[in-house]
Image (spheres, grey):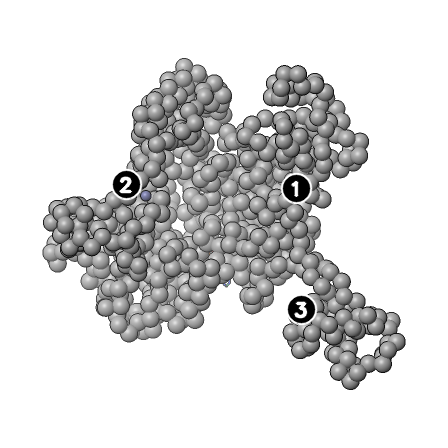
Amino acid sequence: MIAHVAVEAAVDRLFDYAVPDALRTQIAPGVRVRVPFGRRTTFGYVVEVSAARTDATHQTDLLASDAPRTLKPILALAGEHPFLTEPLLRLIRWIADYYCAPLEATIRGALPAPVRREGARAREQLFVEVVKEAGQTGPIPLTARQTELLAQLRRLGGGWLNTLCRELHCTPAVLRKLAEAGLLTIAPQARRRDPLARRTVLPTQPLTLMPEQAAALARATALCDEPAPKPLLLLGVTGSGKTEVYLQAIAHVLKQERGAIVLVPEIALTPQTVQRFAGRFGSQVAVLHSALSDGERFDEWHRIRTGAARVVVGPRSAVFAPVPRLGLIVVDEEHEPSYKQDEMPRYHARDVAVMRGRIEHCAVVLGSATPAMESWRNATRSKYHLARLTRRVDDRPMPSVRIVDMRIELARTGHVSVFSAALLEAISARLAQSEQVILFLNRRGYATSLQCPKCGFVATCEACSVAFTYHQADAALRCHTCGAYQPLPAVCPGCGDPAFKYAGFGTQRIETIVHTCFPHAHVARMDADVTARRHSHDEILGAFRTGDTDILIGTQMIAKGLDFPGVTLVGVLLADGSMHQPDFRAGERTFQLLAQVSGRAGRGELPGEVIVQTYTPSHPAVVAAETADFDTFAAAELAARQAGGFPPFAHLTCLTFRGVSEEKVAFVANTFAARLKTLAPAGVVLADATPSPRPKAKGAFRYQILLRAAAASAMRAPVRQVVADTKLPADVLLAIDVDAVSVQ
Ligand code: ADP
Ligand code: ZN
């Protein structure tokens, strides 16, 4: 018996090992093993087991030339259980192939680090149990205190030693005495580290569905019962109750003793989101999230693997959750760019979910108010089913959207202002009626950049060639690309003048202005700077929910998924941020963002209003946002994509080269492009190597090559071939991004 192993080493191929007789019954695809590799030993994952070798010569080429041609044996099994099921392994092999990523790195990416770590195990703590058969008093006479404790323990039945000592005000020694007397047992037991332990989760019951919800649910459950279902795109306007459809579809698969995975964008994975699932399914819910402690992640993953938790809620990596009998995968906000992993393997979790659905024959529901053009086109061509929720729950009206042309505001006031008169008036009106306001700005910091009014000098991060952002709280300049930090210079480094001008504005400056304009309002701000602390997120949202906060100012963090019925006004301070980017998806992103932010208004009894400030009111995304008309926007957008030969009418692969020497990076990129041109089959459109739209980041120069073709597979072979043939200099790195969502 021979095992084909993906070895934890920087070599992208499988290696064969002999399976010793002693391990025969345990070695199967998915187990982790310790193997000899060259002069050392390392870990690997068994990918296949067969009777014959597949790699013929590898161990001899790799090792000294006099190495024996016999196979080396697997040394030991690592971990008690297989780490991957057979369908997951198939999925991972597909990812490695499709996204041109090494198999071993892809396997590693699919397993949480705390699960893979050597020696990671369940936490054991001492558990106390009362021995039932023991008599009332036991073999030794008990003191009054001991008798009393025993009575209390009998009532409780038992518990964790440390908890009992705290609750019963006794020391462990006292309980040990009782154990010695044979009245109690004290023994180590696995104690779950529960990420929701500190939360009170209120149980909820299924709601009576609106007709459109009921129809969508019927479609989804029918798919769960089909042997090989197509994915379902659930296009529901904001506030139409998509989550309730997910919840009831999950209840359906749970009834069949199957499991479900719910993917949500990382920033939408708020306590509120988790509560909605935990409230319905209780301890059957497992959360996988990078903010969990290692112990919590370890325990949650094993609860999933054993079937103790059958509903998994998590960000993109949760698509690999080892759910035993998977019945349904939900991808909420399926259009979110954060589903694309921006490091190797560069997979798109939505597309991986669709592939996992195909492999495991389970239903996949993709939900969004503003689907990605890729998904929308699949739905219009019947590759996906489509269900629509066109109305908000209880027929609440969609918010009215008003576009404010800031150019007119500038002409009227003679200066650049942060707030238009219309928005200020609307805020006062809401505050007067004790209603809540969200102010949204797609950027953090106090002023975007600092510019000297005398000489025009702009404080710039040298490593990234982007302007620093000024942060008022600690009077610092920060680079939002590389995180570099620098105290605010006392005088202009260009001309020595002490007056720096705030050239832009960020969430901090808005907070200051709001305080000045509305001194009696309770204002909170939520952005990555504030929420760096672990629980501040919960606190800020909690205060907003209870109505203690009147105005919430934030970045895209508050755009998604939040459901606050008291909010009647949403102000978008500047819609232009996302629309002028050198990316063919800029229009789509702007429309999505405006629709998402607008969706936060008017979710309760009172109707909502949205005010969008912009210098580009005629932009198609802004015009479409005014009427929240996805279909019209999508039709125009698709026509433009087709004319330009962009996705979803073509697949795009972006090769990015980076390194500290611009000359070297350019040379390697050009050589690569030239080689690709000779190899690429007809139908692959290939541009010359060019500096990336963001030509420098984190001290490295960046060049890119964009390839386009009707099928991603057409680009794979030539790219692989050139990668295999070209030895990159050690200081030039290549990133291959198949189906890139951002080409910056
Ligand atoms: P979406 O995700 O589509 O924006 P949500 O799922 O957040 O919408 O639903 C919006 C609100 O409507 C939530 O407070 C939810 O509890 C409520 N809701 C959903 N479905 C129903 C229903 N059938 N009856 C009453 N309320 C509902
Ligand atoms: Zn920088």
Q: Are marks 2 and 3 in contact (CB under 8 Å)?
A: no
Whether the residue carrying mark 1 lies under 8 Å from ligand 1 is answered with: no
Name the residue located 63 percent from the left edge and 31 percent from the top edge.
Answer: 40
At numbered mark 1, what does the secondary structure look like: helix, strand or loop?
Answer: loop
Q: Give the number of marks.
A: 3
> How far apart are the two marked residues, 2 and 3, measured between alpha carbons?
54 Å
- Horizontally, residue 471 falls left or right of residue 548, namely left
Badge 1 is on which residue? 83
Residue type, numbered disc 2: Glu
Q: Who comes first in sequence, dot 2 or dot 1? A: 1
**Among numbered discs 3 and 1, the one appearing first in the sequence:** 1
Q: Is residue 686 visible?
A: no
Mark 2 vs ligand 2: CB below 8 Å: yes
Check whether the beta carbons of the residues at disc 2 and disc 1 lie within 8 A of each other. no
Q: Which residue is mark 2?
A: 462
Q: Position of residue 268 (x, y in %)?
A: 46, 54
Determine whether the residue tagged by mark 3 lies in a helix, strand or loop.
helix
For label 3, the residue is 162
Look at label 1 and name its amino acid: Phe
Q: Quadrant of residue 8?
A: top right
> Residue 255: x percent and y percent?
67, 54
Q: CA distance from mark 2 to mark 1?
A: 44 Å
- Check disc 2 and report its element: helix, strand or loop: loop
Are there few (<14), some (14-19), or many (20+) residues within 10 Å of tag 1?
many
Between discs 2 and 3, the one toward the N terminus: 3
- Up the image or down, 533 lies above or below 79; here it is below
Quick check: can you spot residue 113? Answer: yes
Which three-letter amino acid code belongs to the residue tagged 3?
Asn
